[in-house]
Image: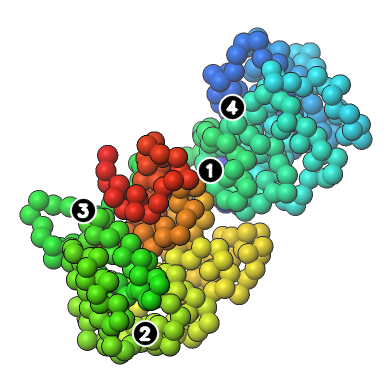
Amino acid sequence: MKVLSVEEMKKYDQKTMTEFGIPSRILMETAGNGCADFIKSKISRDSDVLVICGSGNNGGDGFVIARRLFNYGFKVKIFLFGNPEKSSPETKINYELARKLNIPVQSLDLSEKDFTELNINKNTVIVEALFGIGFKGNLSPELSDFVTFINEKSGKVFAVDIAGGIEGNTGKTENSFRADYTLAIAKPKYGHLLGKGFINSGKLEIVKIGIPKSYFEEADARLITEKNVKFPERRREFNKGNYGKPGIIAGSRGLTGAAIMASRAALRSGAGLITLFHPENLADIFETSLTEVMTKPLKNAKGILNYLKSCSVILLGPGLGQSDFAVKTVKCVLENYSGKLVIDADGLNILSENPEFMTSSSAEIILTPHLGEFARLSGNTIEEITADPIGKLKEYCRKRRVSVLLKNFTSVFCRNNKLSFITSGNDGLATGGSGDVLSGIITSFLAQNLDPENAVPAAAFLLGKTAEKASRKREPRSIVPTDIINSLFVF
């Protein structure tokens, strides 16, 4: 499923009007009717419906919704923010049509701090059509108080296109309506999937308004779902050579578990012939722990040079530490390997201190940082990244000529300026070792000849879905990374 920026949505909206001759009022009517029909299917007949409308086109959608629900026989009232006389012609027309039907319209005075007189309770259904995707910044203190009141006192909340108070491109919000359902017009937007925008959007429902499907083909972002995720091809006649020979360079004293989990995850996700390269003094641990994985001890960093050409893909970093051996190994691999190179954990920490290691590398580099690691890599604060996650991610990828999977509760993979959003998962992944498992799966999928554009998002999606399935048998808090490894592709 394609995901749009605010600018793309506005462009396709305008393009539909100019190239297909569909007036804005028809698009508004279609959007409003689609939203109203969905709301009707989710509420009881005795619900009190309160439609909160701004004076922009999002408010125009709200007036259409109010009119249609009123005609369905629901008890409807409109709260109005702003002056409809200053609205677009189509919004003004729909406001006037609502008045002609004698739908009660009340201009809300936010200076009144006591909202209890509004008689809003758990039987009140809120339809929020205040700002739409163009909102930026923060709500005024008075409006923020009203939003908090609605969130605490009302029944179901339906947000039209995006919950008021959420920025459409970033998901950033200090306070916003907490929607039970967000009725996204045409396609999801970045802000539905990022930051608090993901949390406060509730369930996402797509409302089609007649924009030609072909327009969306040029959009450079997608949401990974069960319908479009792509896993490596498996064939009856294939042998282990067809499923790749990944090399994993990992482990150090006290951090051997990271290397073991990455290796086992690569094995469980289908890699053909795995070799773990590790410091020489850890040989006994790995030889007894990894019966299905080959292990190769390295006396020094240059010892890896004898094996690089035999590896179809390399994972560098899990539990590697930041010793002199680790730093020299990272430098050696980047200088001498030209294949697909996944760098995680301590590999990322070493790169944040030595970014010049990547400058002349001929490897196809894929980095897998969480927010803290990405902050160190990019030189931005976490606050700066969360204020503009897509902008910072694309900027770094262009500057360093790398691909990056930015891990979070919504992960985003950026490669060649294209984006993949992955929202699968739960808090069972919020534990040490989950990243090691993910890096092992990514490495395995790449070794099985799945292109990075599909391999990395598929691995992240699989990790999340496996955690979701595991939570059917145990509380997410008790899920550990080895549970995930043992449940990969278990249906």
What quarter of the picture does the C terminus occupy?
top left
Disc 2 marks which amino acid? Thr
Q: CA distance from mark 2 to mark 3?
A: 33 Å
Residue at 41% of width from left, 47% of height from top? 479
Q: CA distance from mark 4 to mark 3?
A: 40 Å
**What numbered label is drawn on residue 35?**
4
Q: Along the horizontal axis of the image, is 339 left or right of 417?
A: left
Q: Earlier in the sequence, mark 4 or mark 1?
A: 4
Q: Earlier in the sequence, mark 2 or mark 3?
A: 3
Of circles 2 and 3, which is in front?
2
Q: Which residue is mark 3?
A: 233
Of circles 2 and 4, which is in front?
2
Q: Along the horizontal axis of the image, is 491 left or right of 163?
A: left
Of circles 2 and 1, which is in front?
2
Q: Which residue is mark 1?
A: 188
Q: Is residue 243 visible?
A: yes
